[in-house]
Amino acid sequence: MEDKLYWYWFCTMLGMNARKQHEILNLFQHPKELWNLSFSVMETTFSKTICKRWIESKDETKIQKQYDQMKKEEIEFLLSKEAAYPQKLKEIYDYPYGIFQKGQPWQEKDLVIAIVGSRHPDRYGLEIARNFAQDLAQRGIGVVSGMAKGIDAAAHWGALKMEGSTAGILGCGIDQIYPRDNHQLFYEMYDKQSVFSEYPMNVRPDAWRFPERNRLISGWSDGIVIVQAEKRSGSLITADCGLDQNKEIFAVPGPVWNSKHAGCHALIRQGAKLVESVDDILSEFPNFMKSSENISQLSEKCLANPEKKVYANLDLYPRHINEIMTKTGLNFQQTVEALFHLEAKGYIKQISHNTYIKNIHKR
Amino acid sequence: MLYQEVISGIIYGVTGQLIRVEVEMRNGLPYFTMVGYLSKESTEAKERVASALRSVGHPLPAMKITVNLSPANIRKNGTAFDFPIAVAFLACLGKIPSKELNRTCILGELGLNGTIHGVGYCLPIVMEAKKQGIHRFFIAEEDSDSVEEMEDVEIIFMRRLSDIFHYFDGMMEKSGRKNKKWKKKPMEEDFLDMKGQQHLKRAIEIAITGRHHILLVGSPGSGKTMAIKRVPSILYPLTKQERMEVQSIYDAAGIVRNLLDDRQPFRTPHTSISKAAFLGGGHLPKAGEITLAHHGILVLDELMEYRPECLESLRQPLEERKISIYRAGHPMIFPSDFQMIAAMNPCPCGYALEDGKCRCTYHQKKQYLKKLSGAILDRFDMILTVVNEEEPSNLLEESSKMIRERVIQNVEKEHQLLSGTDYHFFSEIRPADMENLCPLSKKCIEVLKMAYRMKKVTKRGIWKLKKLAMTIALMEGETKIQEHHLMEALSFRNTGFISEVSGDGR
């Protein structure tokens, strides 16, 4: 049997987590030794369940069949000793020996930032996540996230848009599309970027796998940006993992009245760095090139009066035309006209009909 | 052999159908039979006629009697035949001159003591008979409410069967009844109670003025239903012609309505309504909700809860302003020139338009919006998203009365503007007449181009946008479309809300 197949067997078919795998490979040099062990030794050294799996899985044709099936689905199995394996991952103590990859090969970047956050964010969080990802990608920084709904997806979309380098790390089998809502993102990622998972095909998205996955997101990156997290949020697990792994933690603040940002605020209180722009992130990595770009808000000076008034009343929280009208005190026609012109000039963005936010992507 | 024929009528669909009542008497064993595809209540006329004739002193003779209602292939419903049968008997017996009955239509139900009761559906029959050249009608006095405004016909109201003798003797007393007055009830709902939602209120006013179909998409509690409930308080009144048409439809459907009631019909069918009740039809064809909303407003609140077949069937009436259905091999055409006002939630939970509030999955949303075909969406001139307002404006609210006066004025102006054409409202204008009726200035074309570049409007949508802008211009007291009218019209046309809601366009 091929060398890689032994690793495949070892990593996926014995049902051990990464920590256990590391323990075992402290005893043996290569999974082949475990394969060749006699049953009596096996019985004395390992638990009953592992023994049972060991016996059941030692079927060369079955392993070969599974491996071929995987290849057919264009999934790669990367070993930690191979060059294509994301190098940054190897720095964590319980890195997986093998990882599955679908899509394009991962392009190594000097700096990789993870952007994570709520699965049910509001517009503000989405815009920030997407904007940060775009900015980072534009500067040649890798963006990793978890392919979940909300902030994760926004981060991937942002990086995709700038054709930067982004990787999604799944908490389920590599061939699974979860959540279904993101199917479009998945296909784009397969097409242009890479998707990774520790788990082989057909593994269901069980809740307990996600915290395990989070350690990979944090481990892969140099810094973790938490964009929007509620008080009890999975993103905070990622932040905790990051702290264990000695990574930089960044948090984007939100309005204090909005409980959807409570998790971020708690992180800031504990010492996470408050970020307003990508520069705040980059200043923690002095080796990396700096630039002076900021989230630029267009200068309001060149705007005519009703437009100025309308622009001043907009931010990243969506405002309906009614609200804008009330806040500015303009009449209906003036508001509509000002909004039309502002949108035509690109100052503001209509996110859904008659609902507007400031356009922060404009430079 | 004695024979007499008189004319009566039934309701067929929403119009009247004249029926010939033939009576034949000949010698033989006493025997009374009625033929002609009769319903139970029509066959029972036999007993009522016999008693009523006895009460006026002319009992049925002991002869062989046959009554036939023709055409014999149409099912006869209703009780309007009692009176004509009795009259035909009296003519047979020579008690009244039979020549006089030639071009007379008789409608009424008889009591056993000879009183004549109303049947409640005379107007459509009278209108149909008038078309066919019949000018004299004998009708129960109880039915006088619905037909008293008919012109160019002689309608004689009778209270008792004996009145017929008085009529031919020239001794008929003029009935001293005064025309029934209709008192307008004050509207309970008023726009005064609706705080904020300026955009929505403006949209409703525009929709009513230009008779544009409007769809409101919004979060629960954002005021959609509240606004719709207040629509009747700002509607312009029906003209006399329209009133007669509406009254005729309601009479045919057996729904009580006062002839003098000049309010537009305002129909709010329940979401569980069946296709037959919605479009009209059934074994005995009857007008459906869309026909009852003729010259008025059809409200479809919670649009997504209606059966898909009901929604899809709206295509033809919306396009042609009438609906043709086949029932038992007979084509029927029901008028259905209505304005549609619909409301719905954007997703199953209802909060898709509120920031970060919706937890529906992509598939739930898709499933929910599946019913809303492009064809139906395309019929709406205005599609409006409504969201909850956090702090309503403290602007002074207008009362319905003020809005109504403005609407009436503007509708009048609209009719004047379109007087040379066969249109009444801007929403009816077809693309072919667009160039003539709403020319655009250069600046406006520039705005349209810009909107097109910003992907705010499709080529197809421009036509609707122009119609809408015309209405807005009219309300502003201008006859030509200005740029800001177009911009405002843009804010009332949201055709992309489905992809917005489901998050397709990231």
Image: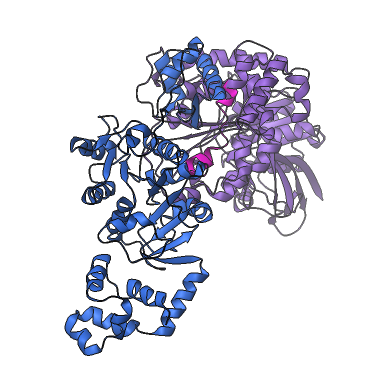
Chain colours: A blue, B purple
B37 vs A119: above or below? below
Residue B38 place in picture, x, y as percent = 66, 53
Residue A226 seen in the current view = yes
Lateral position of residue B349 relative to residue B202, left or right:
left
- The image shows a total of numbered marks equal to 0
As drawn, A181 above or below A29: above
**At which x and y percent is residue B417?**
72, 15
For image coordinates 69% across by 32% down, the residue present is: B138
Residue situated in front as seen by the camera: A36 or A330: A36
Q: For residue B192, which quarter of the picture? A: top left
Image quarter of residue B405: top right
Image vertical order of residue B231 relative to residue B161, above or below: above
The outermost residue toward the front is A287
Q: State the image coordinates of residue A158 (x, y, percent, origin top left).
A: 46, 41
The answer to which image quadrant residue A127 occupies is top left
Q: Could one spot residue B140 in this view of the protein?
A: no
Q: Please report the residue visible at 78 percent of the width from the left and 35 percent of the height from the top.
A: B101
* A76 vs B110, nearest the viewer: A76
Residue B499 covered by magenta stretch: yes
Residue A116, image x and y in percent?
34, 45
Nearest the eye: A89 or B457: A89
Residue bounds of the magenta highlight: B488-506
Closer to the camera, A289 or B346?
A: A289
Q: Is residue B352 magenta?
A: no
